Amino acid sequence: MVFSSALIENAVNEFSKLPGIGKKTALRLVLHLLKQETAQVEQFGDVIARMRQQIRFCTVCHNVSDADVCSICSSHSRQKSVVCVVESIRDVMAIENTQQFNGLYHVLGGIISPIDGIGPDQLNIHSLVERVQHQGVEEVIMAVSPTIEGDTTIYYLSKKLKDFPVKITTIARGIAFGGELEYADEMTLARSISNRLPLESYVQNK
């Protein structure tokens, strides 16, 4: 791709670093911005910069937040005795979109995957154990993608929590094995949460 401007080329290169954005799409975005008023483009850049500089991660559940504690954890209307364990922030958003869950969340920040060099110490597991031990948690829902790595993570977490008086469940497998939670349609995900199973039942069916 030949550019007549180094500034355009640099902008295209930066946009193409985003997931799913190729050089042609990046060029369309850059040319679109060129057609906008200078003030609009400056506002766009300022919003992105402030997001990156000021975003926080909830000290309780590790979800993204504008404050030290996110709006979900600080809400008085949420069922604080039920914690839904997910891999990523995107999974929180996917489940919230179903409007079928009124508990709290715990974002692991990934799943155990030795082949990728990700072990338990690199995930938010210790803080989950602390919450179960000290914050009156009665049920932990394992809402992790149904993959081999996801099942490994569920097994590890169940071992870490086995000595506590907490009910451990997993979402019903309406989601195909090997599928990613965030890509499940809202109805399937909602039913999977509503029809969650005791972890023992899930393990026996493996």
Image (spheres, rainbow, N blue to C red):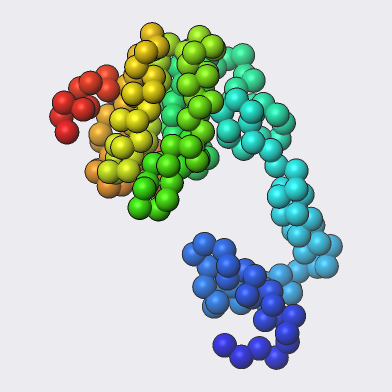
Give the side of residue 171 with respect to residue 54, left or right: left
Residue 136 appearing in the image: yes
Q: Residue at x 67, y 26 (%)?
A: 69
Give the side of residue 94 with respect to residue 56, left or right: left
Q: Quadrant of the N terminus?
A: bottom right
Q: Is residue 179 above or below residue 1?
A: above
Q: Residue at x 20, y 22 (%)?
A: 201
Residue 126 image point, x, y percent? 50, 27
Residue 98 image point, x, y percent? 44, 32
Q: Residue at x 60, y 25 (%)?
A: 60
Give the side of residue 189 with respect to residue 50, left or right: left
**Which of the pair 81/150 is nearer the observer?**
150
Residue 30 image point, x, y percent? 67, 73
Q: Is residue 177 above or below residue 195?
A: below
Q: Residue at x 39, y 19 (%)?
A: 161
**Which of the pair 79/206 is nearer the observer?**
206
**Which of the pair 136/47 is nearer the observer?**
136
Give the side of residue 35 with respect to residue 194, left or right: right
Residue 27 image point, x, y percent? 61, 77
Q: Is residue 200 above or below residue 16?
A: above
Count of marks, rendered view: 0
Q: Residue furthest right?
A: 39
Q: Quadrant of the C terminus?
A: top left
Q: Is residue 192 above or below residue 87?
A: above
Residue 187 appearing in the image: no
